[in-house]
Image (spheres, rainbow, N blue to C red):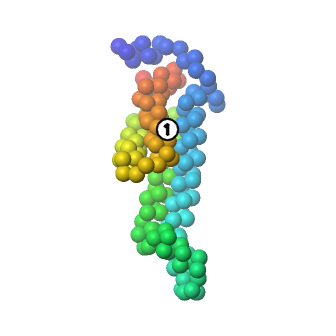
Amino acid sequence: MSDKLTANKKDSGKHYFDRPLGLVLIVFYKAIWGFLETLLGIFIFYSYRLVTNELMEDPQDLLANWIISHFHVTQSTAAAGSIVFALGLVKMILAAAIWLRYKFVRELGIIFFSLIALYGAYHSMLSFSWFTYFALVIDLVALAYFIFELPKHLKKSGIFE
């Protein structure tokens, strides 16, 4: 019953690129962060190899020794880089799916933002960081948008029936 009421509501919000403003902001946010995370993942993945190659050429290299001692660059760094790269890739795929209005995007977004918010809440309890709290709030707002607002906007276009 409430779905019929929601479907009859007129969408009066601002639209850009034939999409609601909230959707555009979420896509922009996730695409930018996803792109930055993929670049960071690639850098992290190759950092161990780069630093160890530099130390093999010059064992007394101050910068390479400083990087190893301060950033704990180890072989597990490649695994961490792969995880960061994969998360960034998932964010970019999610942003593209949101932009292209695929049917599965709402469920995927709810699952993804729920998992990210749970991890952010867990991480916030372990250590204080304004950046972590900010990212957690943004992910919770995006989750609320996917649950409550996105169906209103996309029913009008016939995607959610």
Furthest residue in direction right, as rendered: 17
**Residue 54, position as x, y percentages in the image:** 57, 81
Residue ID at (47%, 33%): 141
Q: Is residue 14 left or right of residue 83?
A: right
Q: Classify 129 as above or below 77.
A: above
Residue 23 is at least partly visible in this image: yes
Q: Classify 94 as above or below 127.
A: above
Quadrant housing residue 75: bottom left
Tally of marks: 1
Quadrant housing residue 18: top right
**Residue 34, position as x, y percentages in the image:** 53, 49
Amino acid type of disc 1? Ile
**The N terminus: image quadrant:** top left
Q: Classify 136 as above or below 78.
A: above
The residue that disc 1 covers is: 138
Residue ID at (53%, 70%): 46
Within-10-Å neighbours for mark 1: few <14, some 14–19, many 20+: some
**Residue 155, position as x, y percentages in the image:** 48, 22
